Amino acid sequence: MHVSSQSRSCAFPGVRGGLNLRCCAAVTLAARLIGRGDKICVLLFTCLYIVSYLILTHFKKTAEFVTDDAEDATVNKIVLWLCTFTLSVAVCAVLLLPISILSNEVLLTFPQSYYMQWLNGSLIHGLWNLVFLFSNLSLVFLMPFAYFFTESEGFAGSKKGVMARVYEAAVLLLLLALLVLGIVWVASALLHDNLARKSLYDLWEYYLPYLYSGISLFGVLLLLLCTPFGLSRMFNVTGSLLVKPRLLEDVEDTLSCTTFEEESLSRKLKCGSTCWVKLNMEAMKKEYLTVQSKRIALEMRRKASPWQRNLGYPLAMLMLLALTVMCVLMVCFNVLELLLDETALPRGMEDPHLGMASFSMFGSLGAAVQVVLILYLMVSSVVGFYSSPLFTGLLPRAQDTHLTEIIANCVSLLILSSALPVFSRTLGITRFDLLGDFGRYNWLGNFYIVFLYNMLFAGLTSASLIKTVTWAVQRELIRAFERIQFVQESVKGQEESQVPLGTCRHTALDPSQHTPPLTLHPTQTSGLHRLPLTVSRSTVPFRLLLASGLSKIQ
């Protein structure tokens, strides 16, 4: 049987031809892996783009896209696509550290798996570089262009159309870029003279990283302010979404008050005006819809099961408290490491060696906890951002958010999310070093900045947590004392009003001071038992309460 030289080479690897064949196979496999990595990145970004588009279409104002002017509708659609791209980049930036940490643990668990060959360091490194590039592109070019594009109308004397608005937006963007370039160059000249000279010759290598370093520092400082406030607000937000136990919340009274308020607003909407004042029907309709949705939510909460009522709320509060305390403890431990070891400072890493060792001393469980803490910090920072007095107006509303507000929200979320990897590594939440250009920031190697940042975060978070817990306990104690006082006054009033059967109590009263008996129709007293807790029931006369009870008995 004739055997070819290629077959002999494959059968005997020691031969030079077999070695060449193995090298060719390795190169082919590497090319396939690189192509597969690009496909994975495209697939991931496509999924995030679809999710981001669905989110923005939920919040966008429909009237801006359904208009008689085809030019405005086209411009709004283009701007919405740019905002969707920016939001998808922001979500991808949030997932950078979780994907990297989980990929390392998967490679540790399955080191020789054939199905995990696509998961390697080059894929993760390329993903970090793409996120850094698209973040720069969105912050510096796409979002300013989108804003100028919505506000532009074309140059005077030019032909109207979409392209005229594109030209005007491009010119405004160029002028803004020159202005920012001049400001940053002057700042770099004041701080680093050599860097200022280089930025004139090499714009891409020195200017853009310097600019993005400033943007990242601003994002990290914004996270420092928003995250502690958001960690304290998470308890209130979670408590409003869950059903509290009956000991902490009386759903029946709140539902009764909400029902009365809804009926009152409904009557006002039907009348249209009062005797003296003409009502604002549009504002009242919005208020009516808000009260109606609140009433529906309260009815759903009243129908909650005892397990959901008595176990869901305490477990959620304990979980939030445990995550917050764990974050503070990890930051305190990182402060001690900074004092004892210089290698604890955040630094960049060019070649990630995935699958060599775990980034947590507790193994896979510790890595999973790190991922949960990173996502928890991001959610808390977003909650704190929208709860702060400065940015409350940016909170998006379903089907009622203008396009300029969508642009502002996308820029804000991108700044927060792109600073999240640096934020997590600076606080010591994870030991995964920053990849690519994320680790080239000038201020990362400064011990005093990193140490002061950790101390401020630990102090602000502890203060916010203590304040939230003490205020909650104080509020519940005051509410409990009010209920006890109301019960005591009610019992005392009933004892004083009791008259023995067969006897008549004669009291010498001045006829001028005699008070006629109180007579109320049952329809006027049917809602007295539904008075809210915020109204002190001791202020209601006892005769009125007694008449209400008699009407219910009848």
Image (cartoon, helix red, strand yellow):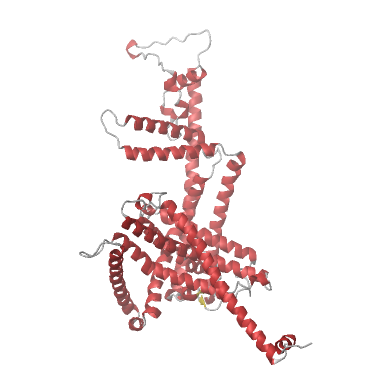
Q: Is residue 227 left or right of residue 372?
A: left
Q: How far from the left and from the top, in percent, is residue 317?
A: 55, 49
Q: Height in image: 232 above or below 309?
A: below
Q: Image quarter for residue 2?
A: bottom right
Residue 338 visible to an observer of this rendering: no
Q: How far from the left and from the top, in percent, is residue 524?
A: 41, 21
Q: Nearer the viewer, residue 481 or 411?
A: 411
Q: Nearer the viewer, residue 179 or 515?
A: 179
Q: Height in image: 306 above or below 179?
A: above
Q: Image quarter for residue 7?
A: bottom right
Residue 103 visible to an observer of this rendering: yes
Q: Is residue 432 left or right of residue 70?
A: right
Residue situated furthest left in the rendering: 157
Q: Nearer the viewer, residue 116 or 255?
A: 116
Residue situated furthest bottom in the rendering: 16
Residue situated furthest front in the rendering: 1
* Residue at the image point whose x is 67% and y is 69% from the top: 109
Q: Is residue 296 left or right of residue 111?
A: left
Q: How far from the left and from the top, in percent, is residue 497?
A: 48, 18
Q: Nearer the viewer, residue 498 or 104?
A: 104
* Residue at the image point whose x is 50% and y is 8% from the top: 503
Point out the image quarter for the N terminus.
bottom right
* Residue at the image point whose x is 33% and y is 39% from the top: 282
Q: How far from the left and from the top, in percent, is residue 328?
A: 52, 61
